[in-house]
Image (cartoon, rainbow, N blue to C red):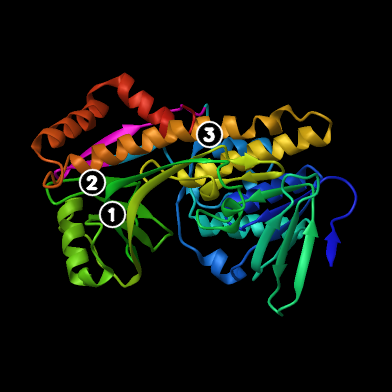
Amino acid sequence: MTEELGDGFTVVVVGAGPAGLTAAVLLQTSGIRTVVLERQSRSYVEGRQRAGIVDTSAVRMFQEWGLADEVLGGIPFDGVLEVRVDGRSRFIDEGDIGDGVKARLCPQQVLVKRLATRYLQGGGDLRFEAAAVALSGIDGERPTVTYRDADGVSHSLAADFVAGCDGDRGVSRQAMPEGSQLTYPYDHGVAHLTVLAEAPPPARPLLAVSTHGYAAHFPRGPHASRFYVQCSPDDQVADWPHDRIWDQLRARLGRADLAGGPINDLEVFRLRSVMREPISHGRLFLLGDAAHVISPMGAKGMNLALYEADVFARAVGDFVRGDGAALAAYSQVCVERSWNYQEFSHWMTEMLHDSGDTSRVGPFRGRMARARLERLFTSGRASAAFAELMAGLG
């Protein structure tokens, strides 16, 4: 049975991560009915630990929609980033680049919980544990999304648009017709061991470079920290017993006094990037990781997803009012921004990973990377350009 979603323009959102829930809340705020389908449970989605910085551009976006106070948790980021080079602390200050608007240190699960609460309190239709999701008819005026609920009952939703926000391996990306997209994959040749631990957070985000390799330390709450440790793409979690992790963090961060604590989560993941274009076809529009994958260096993955949710929601609102220009330009506008931040992320990845342990890249590339890093502390224009990109304003 096909379930029509009522009068007016409607959207089925596939995926309840930051991209999908932001798009749903913004569309709801515009008076456009949505249904959000998510294959995982609510507890899984709201507990998923990921990126932790909502940049200045995204904070400003939520302010423009009148949602910042309601959906943004975390604490204001003072704009100062610490970079510890061979144990010596250096600082990059964004200054007042956002005209008083500051980024937020906001873990993904906090943002997702608040978005879900806002959406449901506003009467939103959020369906968790939706299995076997499939898309059809995206070339027509009423695409259909089918799925099976937690009780095994099959459903079929007809809507005006589909927002595919279900990630790199989701069904939305796979629904793009064969040959309709160009794909540009890139493997950065390094991996990160990610460590979520009950350990005191740093005063501000900390990146560290030394001959031991790259490491980073980010706050994830008043008593929790997320650490990143550069490692080989062939490493397994079993290669990193807890004693080794703490020894390497103390050496790489230049903190012999770093307090350890219980480790709650460990994962090894390769740093890779994927660009796809176009990211729309017919009535299907891809957002977030369904559209692109970006290295975590530069904190652009979640922020690109929030940007795309904003562009999409505004474009659908224009379409409802009779102007389809923004919706037709959605892919081009978002892809251009994504390439810009892919370049920034790649630049950061090379600079911070090549300038420490040079065994992978050799001394020539290592010294070049160190020169790039040093320029951030000696050139006001270089540090200003870096701050602009970090803030999402470049």
Q: Is residue 134 above or below residue 363?
A: below
Q: Which mark is residue 208?
A: 2
| Place of residue 47 in the rendered image (x, y in percent of width and height, measured from the top left) | 52, 66
**Extreme residue toward the left, this view:** 363
Image quadrant in which you'd find residue 300: top left
238 left or right, relative to 343 = left
Q: Which mark is residue 335?
A: 3
Choose mark 3 or mark 1, whichever is in front. Answer: 3
Choose mark 3 or mark 2, whichever is in front. Answer: 3
278 left or right, relative to 356 = right
* Mark 2 residue type: Ala
C-alpha span from label 3 to label 1: 26 Å
C-alpha span from label 2 to label 1: 16 Å
Question: The magenta stretch spans which residues?
Answer: 83-98
**353 falls in the magenta region:** no
Mark 1 lies on residue: 191
Instruction: Write the residue at 22% across / 29% down.
Output: 372
N-terminal of the two: label 3 or label 2? Answer: 2
